[in-house]
């Protein structure tokens, strides 16, 4: 009896521990990189522990590679916790395929896929494989925490290189490598246990920046052509060499350039005419085939096919301008609405897109060559205010693209709300929209039929509790950097009658919800300003005697500006609001001030007004 009781207590004590096990955990993730016979050879070993049926998703394994970096000597199997093999992976269960992407027409990106499914838990999945390549830009780009919800118990990276092989290194969130030196080689060893997964806070750094990682690049390399990462000039020279002999047009296209530009009286006019010709006669398709997708196709390729990726279309525009006697610069950029900042001290391939820079005596023209409807000399939220590399041989250098000003993102709404005697509530609004919302709406308006656009308008949450009845979106001309949105909708109880009064609820409050300062651990980044003005006119069913609950307000701050004006006459209530939040990177030191300003604005915006009728 006593033995049974002790056994029961022991099992009871174990239940919470088992219940706390994650669906999957990574017991071991080891990677070894060795320089051998002018090749980088990479060995990877992974051990997953599947603890529940939900963890089975992790047993569906995809290993990416490219055609020049094939997966070799792949071995895998299922084991019990004692290490006994239950089943091994068979060759017939391995699938090799191109990585499908809606953005890619052709690609060198491949993957090996397989499944190792078992219905008794917990169990272990082990797999290992080898890769080698003789063309590389990175020696290691290692993130030991591979999954958000699967903790990593043990991880290690080993890099073995010749002693005369200079490298550059970044490491984050890990102890420094233990370095062993022998007569003719050097070995770097990183080990880590129970690596944390760092969640991104709102408007914080991107997830890839927050996780523990090691990045090692060679100072000298051969990728298509020989190159160096000693300086941005060297890296720019490599980029120039890689695209060499791609800037030629077909004979017919040369004649077309001459015809289009013969009456132009300035370089700016030539640039504009050729840019619009490119937009009207080509389309963007991602084609990533040559040298890992970094070398552009020739301009003649685009002449013949009328399509290309960002590199090909930019090179095509560059070549047409060259034919017309206008100098321009192929420009590498990290394109994203919330980008990873370029590490200026680490010359390397930190870019994912290409645009064109056209220097002029009094200004610089920037061209986005993948967007058939982009205004001339307009960079949107994905490429504005960015450190970019001008690829210009020995004159290559880092510069900044223009940043959105407050005026560039200014959005203005003019809204009428009508309340009928029978209580029906309708809204009509016209808005002049700039900045990131302009980019979004323009893309939506170009790509979708009218019947499908309403769902995307709802996602923007331009108005709360509305049922849109009709809308229209238009651009004054193709080079307009704003759109006009006009819509009509019914409102759902945004004005609530209470006897001889009416409760006015906010129609479209502007606010950002941020973490309290004591919970904030990351810098905050506003990539562009927020600048919205709204004029709302309420037509109420009776004359107004007074308004309470809301009043005219002004908040001035180094972080922005807030203003609300309230007025009424007869049965019309007018609310004019303006909120501006400055762009910038806000450190933890000044976050509290920003938070207090945003909180004050939010409190004002969520206030309800009480109208008393005469």
Image (cartoon, rainbow, N blue to C red):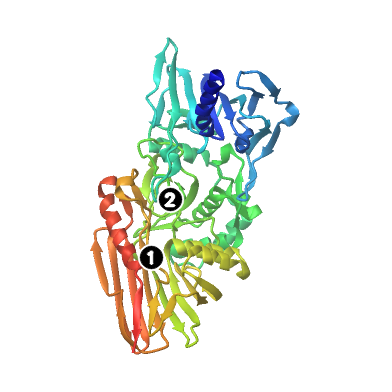
Q: Earlier in the sequence, mark 1 or mark 2?
A: 2
**From what the image shows, is residue 58 above or below residue 458?**
above
Of 411 and 611, the residue lying toward us? 611
* Residue 546 image point, x, y percent: 30, 83
Number of numbered labels in the structure image:
2
Disc 2 marks which residue?
338
Disc 1 marks which residue?
510
Secondary structure found at label 1? loop
Q: Is residue 509 visible?
A: yes
**Apparent side of residue 286 relative to residue 549 in the rendered image (left or right):** right
* Residue 296 image point, x, y percent: 56, 44
Secondary structure found at label 2? loop
Of 452 and 468, the residue lying toward us? 468
Q: Few, some or many C-alpha atoms within 10 Å of disc 1 (few <14, some 14-19, many ≥20)?
A: many
**Apparent side of residue 476 relative to residue 65 in the rendered image (left or right):** left
Q: Which residue is drawn at 62% across and 54% down?
A: 307
**Apparent side of residue 119 relative to residue 232 in the rendered image (left or right):** right
Furthest residue toward front:
1
Q: Few, some or many C-alpha atoms within 10 Å of disc 2 (few <14, some 14-19, many ≥20)?
A: some
Q: Is residue 373 visible?
A: no
| Picture quarter with the C terminus | bottom left
């Amino acid at each position: 009896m006593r033995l049974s009781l002790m056994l029961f207590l022991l099992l009871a004590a174990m239940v919470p521990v088992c219940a706390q096990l994650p669906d999957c955990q990574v017991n071991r993730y080891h990677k070894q990189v060795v320089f051998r016979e002018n090749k980088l050879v990479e060995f990877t070993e992974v051990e997953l522990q599947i603890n529940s049926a939900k963890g089975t998703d992790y047993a569906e394994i995809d290993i990416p590679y490219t055609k020049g970096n094939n997966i070799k000597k792949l071995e895998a199997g299922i084991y019990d916790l004692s290490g006994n093999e239950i089943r091994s992976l068979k060759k017939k269960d391995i699938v090799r395929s191109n990585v499908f992407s809606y953005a890619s027409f052709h690609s060198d990106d491949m993957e090996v896929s397989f499944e190792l499914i078992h219905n008794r838990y917990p169990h272990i999945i082990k797999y290992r494989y080898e890769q080698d390549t003789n063309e590389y830009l990175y020696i290691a780009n290692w993130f030991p925490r591979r999954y958000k919800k699967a903790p990593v118990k043990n991880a290690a990276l080993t890099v073995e290189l010749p002693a005369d092989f200079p490298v550059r290194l970044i490491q984050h969130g890990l102890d420094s490598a233990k370095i062993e030196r022998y007569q003719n080689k050097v070995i770097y060893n990183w080990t880590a246990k129970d690596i944390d997964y760092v969640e991104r806070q709102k408007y914080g750094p991107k997830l890839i920046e927050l996780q523990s990682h090691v990045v090692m690049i060679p100072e000298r390399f051969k990728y298509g052509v020989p190159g160096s990462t000693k300086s941005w000039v060297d890296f720019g020279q490599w980029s120039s060499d890689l695209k060499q002999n791609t800037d030629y047009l077909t004979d017919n296209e040369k004649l077309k350039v001459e015809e289009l530009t013969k009456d132009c009286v300035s370089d700016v006019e030539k640039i504009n005419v050729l840019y619009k010709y490119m937009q009207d006669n080509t389309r963007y398709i991602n084609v990533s085939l040559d040298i890992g997708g970094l070398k552009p196709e020739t301009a003649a390729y685009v002449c013949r096919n009328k399509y290309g990726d960002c590199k090909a279309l930019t090179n095509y525009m560059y070549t047409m301008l060259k034919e017309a006697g206008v100098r321009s610069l192929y420009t590498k950029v990290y394109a994203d609405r919330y980008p990873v900042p370029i590490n200026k001290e680490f010359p390397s391939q930190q870019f994912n897109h290409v645009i064109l820079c056209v220097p002029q005596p009094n200004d610089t023209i920037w061209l986005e060559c993948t967007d058939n409807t982009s205004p001339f000399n307009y960079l949107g939220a994905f490429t504005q205010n960015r450190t970019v590399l001008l690829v210009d041989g020995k004159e290559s250098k880092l510069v900044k693209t223009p940043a959105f000003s407050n005026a560039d993102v200014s959005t203005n709404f003019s809204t009428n709300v009508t309340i009928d005697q029978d209580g029906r509530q309708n809204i009509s609004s016209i808005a002049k929209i700039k900045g990131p919302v302009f980019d979004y709406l323009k893309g939506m308006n170009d790509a979708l039929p009218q019947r499908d656009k309403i769902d995307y308008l709802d996602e923007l949450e331009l108005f709360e509790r509305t049922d849109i009845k009709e809308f229209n979106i238009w651009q004054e001309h193709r080079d307009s950097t704003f759109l006009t949105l006009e819509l009509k909708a019914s409102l759902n109880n945004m004005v609530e009658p209470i006897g001889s009064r009416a409760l006015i609820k906010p129609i479209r409050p502007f606010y950002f919800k941020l973490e309290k300062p004591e919970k904030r651990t990351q810098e905050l980044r506003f990539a562009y300003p927020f600048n919205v003005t709204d004029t709302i006119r309420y037509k109420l069913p009776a004359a107004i005697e007074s308004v309470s609950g809301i009043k005219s307000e002004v908040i001035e701050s180094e972080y922005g500006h807030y203003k609300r004006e309230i007025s009424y006459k007869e049965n019309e209530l007018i609310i004019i609001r303006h909120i501006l939040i400055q762009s910038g990177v806000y450190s933890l030191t000044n976050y509290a001030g920003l938070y207090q300003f945003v909180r004050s604005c939010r409190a004002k915006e969520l206030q309800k007004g009480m109208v008393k009728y005469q």
